[in-house]
Image (cartoon, coloured by chain):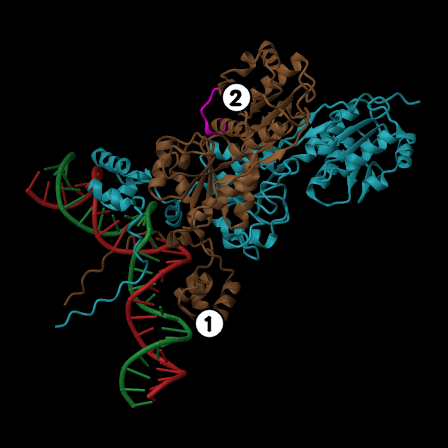
Chain colours: A cyan, B brown, C green, D red
Amino acid sequence: MEEPRKRARPGRAPAPAGRTSRPRQAEVARLAGVSQATVSLVLGARKQGVTISEETRRKVLDAVRALGYVPDPAASRLAAARNNLLGVFSFTSTFPTDVQHSYYPFLVGVEQEAAARGYDLVLFTGSSTGGAGAAGPNALARVRLADGCLFLGRHAPAEELRRLVADGFPVVHLGRRDELEGLAWVGADYISASQEVVGHLTALGHRRIVLVREDDDAPASTDREHGFLKGLEEAGLPGGPAAVFRSADPERDLTAERLRGWLDEGVTAFVAEETDTGDAWRALHGAAHFVGIDCPRDASLALLGSPPPDLAEEPAPTGFDIPRPQLGAAAVRMLAALVSGEEAAEPLVACTFRPGSTAGPAPARY
Amino acid sequence: MEEPRKRARPGRAPAPAGRTSRPRQAEVARLAGVSQATVSLVLGARKQGVTISEETRRKVLDAVRALGYVPDPAASRLAAARNNLLGVFSFTSTFPTDVQHSYYPFLVGVEQEAAARGYDLVLFTGSSTGGAGAAGPNALARVRLADGCLFLGRHAPAEELRRLVADGFPVVHLGRRDELEGLAWVGADYISASQEVVGHLTALGHRRIVLVREDDDAPASTDREHGFLKGLEEAGLPGGPAAVFRSADPERDLTAERLRGWLDEGVTAFVAEETDTGDAWRALHGAAHFVGIDCPRDASLALLGSPPPDLAEEPAPTGFDIPRPQLGAAAVRMLAALVSGEEAAEPLVACTFRPGSTAGPAPARY
DNA sequence: GCGCATTACTAATACGCATTAGTGATCCGG
DNA sequence: CCGGATCACTAATGCGTATTAGTAATGCGC
């Protein structure tokens, strides 16, 4: 009887013999005289019912050391384990040359917290092209290599994010992002911080305060306005639309005349929001300077955030600082929680009040 | 005849049914009415001999779109032994709180070049503990997740680096590192740059020039000295030990007396090396200031590198700039070459001459 | 109209690790 | 000293993709 013809054995070509490849669990097992599964069990340190004798454990660990074995993270990942990698995705370059406008401060916290928790970071840059980084509808696909991913900036396409979330891939967005159901995020508590700044002003005796903001519906803007109004309300002051000056181009619209008008109406304090451009504060600051206001004697100014870099040399404005490193750290904490299936952590991070030197007692009415 | 008892089928537990997992190539294949292998071939776009009809290709791509299929990077990596990830390892934090002393400028170039070539970056921080990042003899083990790894700083343990290199793992060290056989590196061409600076001084008529350096045998130091001496030689000036002032603590040893002595001997130009601490330049700069030298009228100063941050406000010293981003980019180029098995790229990166304002014509002898 | 090429696929692996059912031992109580 | 429990370990998968030997189907030359 003829032996059935042996089927050919296709598949991977053997590795080039010249280059000694690093050891596998199989080699370790051979050297230790056990099975590959045993090696995996010893190294996995799983708390499951399986028990390994001290003797065997030692033999395996000796072999591991002798061969210098290190696990292949890709294989671990494929076999449904973790690989201790957290992705960080930003659509703008992760390392913009200009440190000032970059995500650098966030990354400081991200890296620290990730390191503290034993995660390494994978930097995905949205701008990358070709290879794995091809743009297009699947630009986010490669983040799945990591155990979870952090998103910086609001340019991540909602559709793709939704898909990741729907697939149960752990995702955290840095910055509030409510419109996407199920998307975890961490953000600064602008409401409380803005309220606190207004509280500071009212405590100094200011009764008429105006908020200067840009024409923008980002949560970061509306939250500040919300906090501002809460602060007024808390002090028993009227909120009304008159208290908020909203302009798409504050530097053009916030004229000296307008400022003088407010002063004549008894306004003694002005608050600007922080934006990407810093235009609100620049406009307010510039107009006050132009009108010749002696701040904080004639009137007080406050900034809901940090000043733009070009005004960094000026005296520190009264307001609050966004604790960017802490935000980054909080984002990592939340992502780590998602990855390990725990309950989500706290999404809001408190801002720190900055006394500054642009706010003082309300001037006596004249 | 009894059927041989069916062996149980151990292995992975079925995925929790609740969570719909993302589609696999198998699903795509089913929808398109082809085999999984065909799907892989269509997507892989391999230039190998296999040919796929336009008809089939279209069907597959349609199915891919319909299901929203995206490949699993871990699986690709496992099967193809490549994942388009480049590691970046630094023992100090990659994003330190103090931006000044960081690798940040290098990373700018690393990131850009990596993105341009379709690689993503994995950041490994030597400080991370626990999980995959445990320190110990295998602290470098996890870098093998990537296709290759870039090392910043000279703190990477030689033994482990040697092991990586021996295993054929692509490694590039940023900064010259000759003592490790087979270790690829990229570095700035301090020799040429230093020589050029000296050439600039000799062209201005300086005949007696002194180099101030720290007591250190790093290549970065010896290269500068080498270039300095070459520069002298080129101008037909004597090199001798008198031309080099070497001190472990320049700020203490470079006294005003010493400086005056040199001036009396006819020295008209001083050159300091750049170091981590910036001590050589700080000492030279301080002593010159103390002695009351009107620079560059009375004497010329030059710095082989960039000034330390605390002296950044001073007028730019004549010297050269280390093109850190370009160095990072060159490192990535070399790493990419190693990964893809090509010939190694150029290891030396030219520094750019910085005219500055601390060097002028040699004063007339009096 | 019979070999020989070429074309267009598919079957059957392999990649390295994690998991779990199963299997001899050995132990233990009654 | 027998049945069950416990121990220590191994066999046999699976994860999702890439690769290659093989194979029908067709074309081509003479």
Q: Is residue B54 visible?
A: yes
Q: Nearer the viewer, residue A22 or B282?
A: B282
Residue B54, given in percent of the width and then of the height, sits at 48, 72
Residue C19, given in percent of the width and then of the height, sits at 33, 47
Question: What residue is shown at x 57% (from left), y 49% (from top)?
Answer: A126
Tag 2 or tag 1, which sits nearer the N-term? 1
- B212 sits left or right of A291 in the view: left
Specify the segment rendered in magenta: B214-221
Question: What residue is shown at x 46% (from left), y 59% (from top)?
Answer: B23
Residue A271 located within the stretch drawn in magenta: no
Q: Which amino acid does the dot numbered 1 rest on?
A: Thr
- B335 sits left or right of A291 in the view: left
Label 1 and label 2 in one chain? yes
Q: Which mark is residue B213?
A: 2
Identify the element where label 2 is drawn.
Answer: strand
Residue C15, given in percent of the width and then of the height, sits at 33, 52
Chain containing mark 1 = B
Circle 2 packing at 10 Å, graded few (<14), some (14-19), many (20+), is many
- A39 sits left or right of A117 in the view: left
Q: Which amino acid does the dot numbered 2 rest on?
A: Arg
Residue picked out by circle 1: B56
Circle 1 packing at 10 Å, graded few (<14), some (14-19), many (20+), is some
Residue B217 located within the stretch drawn in magenta: yes
| For residue B277, above or below residue A142 | above
Chain containing mark 2 = B
Q: Nearer the viewer, residue A56 or A290?
A: A290
In the picture, residue B103 is in which quadrant?
A: top right
Whether label 1 touches label 2, CB < 8 Å: no
In the picture, residue B301 is in which quadrant?
A: top right
Question: What residue is shown at x 57% (from left), y 51% (from top)?
Answer: A161
Q: Which mark is residue B348?
A: none
Tell me the CA gap for discs 1 and 2: 69 Å
